[in-house]
Image (cartoon, helix red, strand yellow):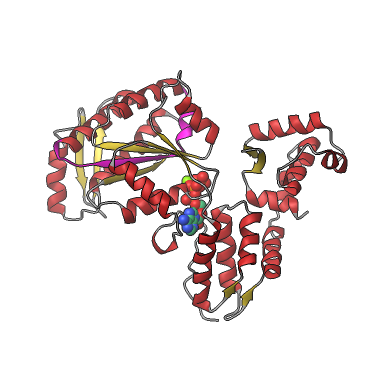
Amino acid sequence: MINRKNPFKFDREVDGSYFCGREDAISDTEDYIVNQTNMIMFSKRRIGKSSLIKEVFNNRLDKGILTAHVDIYAISNIRELYEYLKEGIECSLLGKESSLDKLSKLTQTLNDFFVNSDIKLIVSGSPKIEISSTEKDYYKSLQQLFYGYFAFLKANNLQAIIAIDEFQKIVSLKDSEKVEALLRTIVNKRENCSFIFTGSKRNLLLSLFNKSDRPFFKLGTEYPLNPIDMLEFFKWTESRFKVKNVILEKDAFEYLYDISDGETRFIQLVSYKLFRTQEDSSIITLAIMAKYVNSIIKSKKDFGMYLETFTTAQQNTLKVIAVSGGVNLFDEKVLIRYDIKTSSLQSAIKSLMEKGIVFKSDDYVQFEDIEFKLWLKFL
Ligand SMILES: Nc1ncnc2c1ncn2[C@@H]1O[C@H](COP(=O)(O)OP(=O)(O)OP(=O)(O)O)[C@@H](O)[C@H]1O
Ligand SMILES: [Mg+2]
């Protein structure tokens, strides 16, 4: 067997040749950035928010625009928020510059703009700009960090874009209201800079921005990111299988797309595995695809134990949602078939939503974890 480079990636954010489609979203994002309009981008998980940002930042923007992409999923306090944002700003200042001479001059210049801070160029290994603040209060150091950054941008006629990924995380911080208020002040005072706030908890994210009593009220344009268009995704995937002379039939891809609710990661996972295992010059038919998806899901051993962690009513509800596709859940036939009452179905859905296992989108209920849904469906 020849080992060829697999054209699909499923386990990390992608850009360049691994990135499919989304030309409209790319152009919208570029337009908002150029016009310094803040964006609030949301979608369900694993659809491709972070990858879209990566593609735009790395390959589409004017090289003169400074970019920082900060994922705050792992933070648990204001100090960590500060550290993460500081690192993002340090990287954006460094940009792609590698000349030590230029970086050294830049570091000197930066020292004029950041209050209570010492800016150093670290040259062991790959060069790094380091901002160390003497300020002990992290709220103040966060403010000084951004004000210094904005002043530097303005004085040098530069523009920057900062993406804060998993932004809803700030709601869970201690003193979150104080953090929200501070960030609002910073975002309001921005100069030569704009922000992209992204998140997968749609309601949480929008509640930050849309309630008039919340500090983030109307601070950006809402931008829902939908699954990649089916046809576009099919053509892109089909063309990549041609490297191996493998023919991907359209109904096979359509099946994969539908069954996974268009989740980009799962589609890429299946394509990756299929690319590895399909014989050269073979055909991927609907039957082969269905069998393949089934075998991937059946090989997941942990879901059995996971299911046991739910109450009986919740387990039944999970099965009902998985099998019915989350529509017409309260249909009499469904209730009789699963021997479940409307009221217990209702309360189980509520508790499963609170646990973040399922969520409501339009008028149907979907799983956060598509593999868990399919595992239940194939039981
Ligand atoms: N445009 C794309 N083309 C091809 N693959 C993509 C694309 N966007 C995303 N993917 C694939 O889907 C996976 C999930 O994408 P990504 O991490 O960007 O989504 P996300 O919406 O940020 O997810 P999360 O909510 O979990 O942070 C990636 O690891 C990548 O394999
Ligand atoms: Mg992400």
Position of the C terminus, as image quadrant, is bottom right
- Quarter holding residue 121: top left
Residue at horizontal 24%, vertical 37%?
131
Residue in view at x 28 percent, y 43 percent = 34
Can I make out residue 302 in this image? no
Q: Position of residue 301 (x, y in %)?
A: 71, 55
Q: Judge whether residue 171 is colored magenta.
A: yes
Give the side of residue 262 with respect to residue 322, left or right.
left
- Magenta stretch contains residue 221: no
Which image quarter: residue 162? Answer: top left
Quadrant containing the N terminus in the rendered view: bottom right
Looking at the picture, does residue 296 appear above or below residue 226?
Answer: below
> The magenta stretch spans which residues?
155-174
Which of the two residues, 47 or 89, is positioned nearer the viewer here?
A: 47
Residue beneath the point at 62% across and 51% down: 261
Whole-percent x, y for residue 153 in the image = 20, 38
x, y percent for residue 82: 35, 32
- Please, which residue is most extreme toward the top here? 213
Please tell me whether residue 24 is drawn above or below residue 353 in the rendered image.
below
**Can residue 373 be seen at all in this image of the molecule?**
yes
In the rendered structure, the answer to whether residue 110 lies left or right of residue 277 reads left
Is 375 or 123 nearer to us in this picture? Answer: 375
> How many numbered discs?
0
Rendered location of residue 22, percent (x, y): 44, 54
